[in-house]
Image (tube, helix red, strand yellow):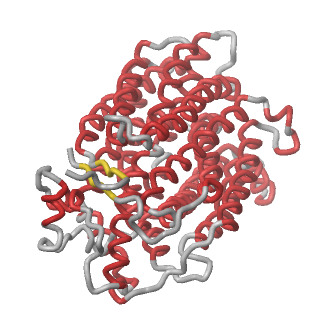
Amino acid sequence: MLIATVPESAGSKPALSPLRLFLLTFCMVGIQFTWTVELSYGTPYLLSLELSKETTALVWLAGPMSGLLMQPLIGVLSDRTTSRFGRRRPYIAIGSVLVCCSLLGVAFARDIAAFMINILGKEAEDPLHYARIIAIVLLWILDFVLNAVQASCRALIVDVPPVWQQDAANAMASSMSNITMVFTYIVGFLDLTAYLPVAGDSQFKVLCVIAIFVFLVAQSVTCLSITEEVYDVIEADSTSWQDTARQVLHSFKSLPRPIQLVCNVIFFAWMGWFPFLFYSTTWVSSIYFQTHPDKDSSDWASGARAGSFALLCYAIVAVISGILLPALTTHSIRNVTLKNVWTFSLLVFSITMISTCFVSTVSGATVILSLLGLSWACIMWIPFALIGEYLNIYNDSHRATYQEPILPKVTYGALHRARIGEGSGSLDDMEANDVSRNNDWLLCSQCESGMVLGILNMYVVFPQFVVAIIASAIFYFVDLGVGDNLEDNTTYKGISILLQFSGIMALVATGLSRYVIDVEIGPKKST
């Protein structure tokens, strides 16, 4: 097993206090709340607009398309931004305004459509037709700008802390996200129209209004409390703007091996997560209506609230896991490493998803979703912690390369050996070869955090393309096989097949996770 040992004193960035870490990662509260509202309640909302299940699955191509384009692009642009406000915060501020506008438009699509029909004098036309168009277009815009803000926030979390605090920073970001999920599902479980009728006349409208408020507060807290370093352009980074696309493509094809190994796991893990994220609420709702035949299946809000309770339990487990697991990995307990914890969480995810075929009650679905909280806490923490450690190892050495005519005193032999693909050996043997081999990891010219995190996100969004197409095909063929008279039954069967598919993909990710390289933070052990 390859492990890179990094002295805790490595790097020139000052350590952050717990309060500063909290303020730095608070931006994730707004992002997670908005994503949770969209992913958990978006599908039932689109179905309430009488959009077919097959078309709804294709609508979610907005996610991978926006992630594929926006996150690498924003990553590169923000890497080069020389604003006095920093590299990331200008994009967070502008993107936040656009997120709120598009989210408001999605929530009030019916009202906007009715207003347009009245203005155009087309009262005879179906307002739902226009509402569907408005909702779909604005959902796409929402995904694009939300991905841009998320890319900037993730890069900011990598930029500010030193290498030895990357695990803590990303663990706190994960905890922020998990706690936000709990809050979101509690809010979603309530009958919001009874408590906040002024915000809207439907559950989804009120949720979106609350999401706008939470999003603006969260981004404001981080942007106003964190100070970024102003980017100083050096000659080695001076490339024309016309080369941006070429740079992204080159970096995508030539990632350092430690980062590539993480990306391989990410790809198959998210092949498993997307069916869950998009259809878990609908899955629980369909079970709810099957076991409550006296309920009207057209009342999607009651089914969604049943799904919200199951997801609330899942979010609570995620919060507990997000607090306990990082504490275990930072106390040097034997074999409790980031890699081993990630492997275990992926195995739990795989077994749980495959088991969905045996679930036929809401209580059973609630247990299944609760178990997934552990796996979610890990996918939101471990990949970013590993990438953050890799990037800070590079950036500390890259900075020293331009400040001094010698290689930095701290060398990272294990990562070097991983980059050139050699087998494991003693750290002394690895470090002895660093200078003579001109360590291409340390001299990698593309290892800026915005760029690499953008590429990492490409490995997240590519699976979503595949899942959207597979989901649409599954719903189509299940409808053909069962017929149109049992719509709730076809929904349950189609989603159940999707969830079992996600379990198989998670099993592949479990195997690939064994190749990931751990980074051991602390003094090098003497031999």
Q: Single out the residue that lies furthest toward the bottom.
A: 235
Q: Which quadrant holds residue 469?
A: top left
In the rendered structure, the answer to whether residue 121 lies left or right of residue 311 reads: right
Q: Looking at the image, which is closer to me, 402 or 473? A: 402
Q: Looking at the image, which is closer to me, 505 or 58? A: 505
Q: Looking at the image, which is closer to me, 4 or 362? A: 4
Q: Name the spot of residue 212 as percent of width and height, x first.
A: 72, 53
Q: Looking at the image, which is closer to me, 510 or 391? A: 391
**Quarter of the image containing the N terminus?**
top left
In the rendered structure, the answer to whether residue 299 lies left or right of residue 91 reads: right
Q: Name the spot of residue 206 as percent of width and height, x first.
A: 77, 42
Task: Say if 129 sits above or below 495 in the image.
Answer: below
In the rendered structure, the answer to whether residue 511 lies left or right of residue 125 reads: left
Q: Which quadrant holds residue 320?
A: top right
Q: Residue at x 61, y 53 (%)?
A: 18
Residue 441 visible in the snapshot: yes
Q: Which quadrant holds residue 404?
A: bottom left
Residue 461 visible in the snapshot: no
Task: Say if 281 sits above or below 520 in the image.
Answer: above
Q: Name the spot of residue 57 as percent of width and height, x first.
A: 47, 40
Q: Residue at x 44, y 35 (%)?
A: 275
Task: Say if 148 sits above or below 342 in the image.
Answer: below
Q: Single out the residue that lies furthest toward the front.
A: 526
In the rendered structure, the answer to whether residue 274 lies left or right of residue 7 reads: right
Q: Residue at x 33, y 75 (%)?
A: 398
Q: Residue at x 82, y 35 (%)?
A: 193
Q: Name the spot of residue 355 as percent of width and height, x first.
A: 39, 18
- Numbered disc total: 0
